[in-house]
Amino acid sequence: MNDPDAALFARVRSAIEAVDPVPTDLADRMIAAIAVADISHEYALLTAVETAGVPVRSDAETTTLQFSDGTSSILLHISHTSRDLRRIDGWVDAETTEIRLSQGDRTWSVPPGELGRFAFDDIPPGLARVQLVTGPNTRDLLTPQFEV
C-alpha cells in the first residue's frame, strides 16, 4: 500500500537535506554555547521528592523539594502549621553565608546552622524562591518559584 503523503514527505526531506543539511558539529556547538552562557546557574533543577498528606497523628500536609544546580543542593521540607501558615525546614550542602526566602516584596533571611540546616517560620502560603548567598567570588544559587 503506497501512501502519497509519505512519499511526498520523503521527497521534501531529501530536498531539504541536499540544500540545507544539518551541520555535523551542531550538537557540540550548542553544548559549548550553553556552557559559556553558564545557563546551569540561571536555572536550578527542581525535583519533587515527595508530596504526601501525613495520615498518622496529624492532618498536616507536607511537601519535600530538592533543588540543585550541579554544584550545590537544597532540600526543603514544607509543612502546614495550625494557623494556616507554613514552616520551611531546609538543608544545604554548600558553603553558604546566608539563605534568603523571597515571596513577592517580602524577604526573610537566616544564616545556615550546623551541617547546613536552616528554617523559616510563619511563612504565608504562596509562591516563593530561595537564594543561597555563597560569597563574593562565587555565584549564588537562586531556585525557581515554588508553592509554599
Image (tube, rainbow, N blue to C red):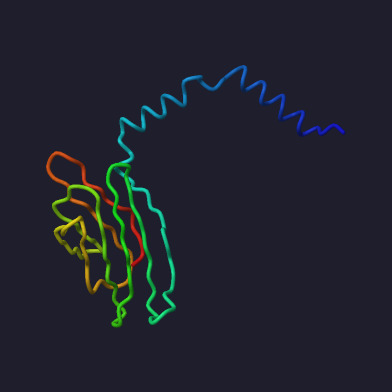
Q: Is residue 127 above or below residue 71?
A: below
Q: List x then y, in percent, for residue 89.
A: 26, 65
Taking depth in this image into account, of 95 and 69 the one nearest to the observer is 95
For residue 115, above or below residue 70: below
How many tags in the picture?
0
| Residue 60 percent location from the top left of the image | 37, 78
Residue that extends furthest to the right in the rendered view of this protein: 1
As displayed, is residue 9 above or below residue 131?
Answer: above
Picture quarter with the N terminus: top right
Q: Quadrant of the C terminus?
A: bottom left
Q: Position of residue 103 (x, y in %)?
A: 26, 64
**Nearest the eye: 105 or 69:** 69
7 left or right of 29 in image: right
Which quadrant holds residue 91?
A: bottom left
Q: Residue at x 33, y 58 (%)?
A: 145
Q: Which percent across, then down, holds residue 21?
A: 56, 20
Above or below, 73 against 106 in this view is above
Name the residue furthest top. 18
Indicate the quadrant where residue 127 lies: bottom left
> What residue appears at the point 72 percent right and 27 percent down from the top-left corner?
10
Q: Nearer the viewer, residue 12 or 69?
A: 69
Q: Is residue 115 left or right of residue 56?
A: left
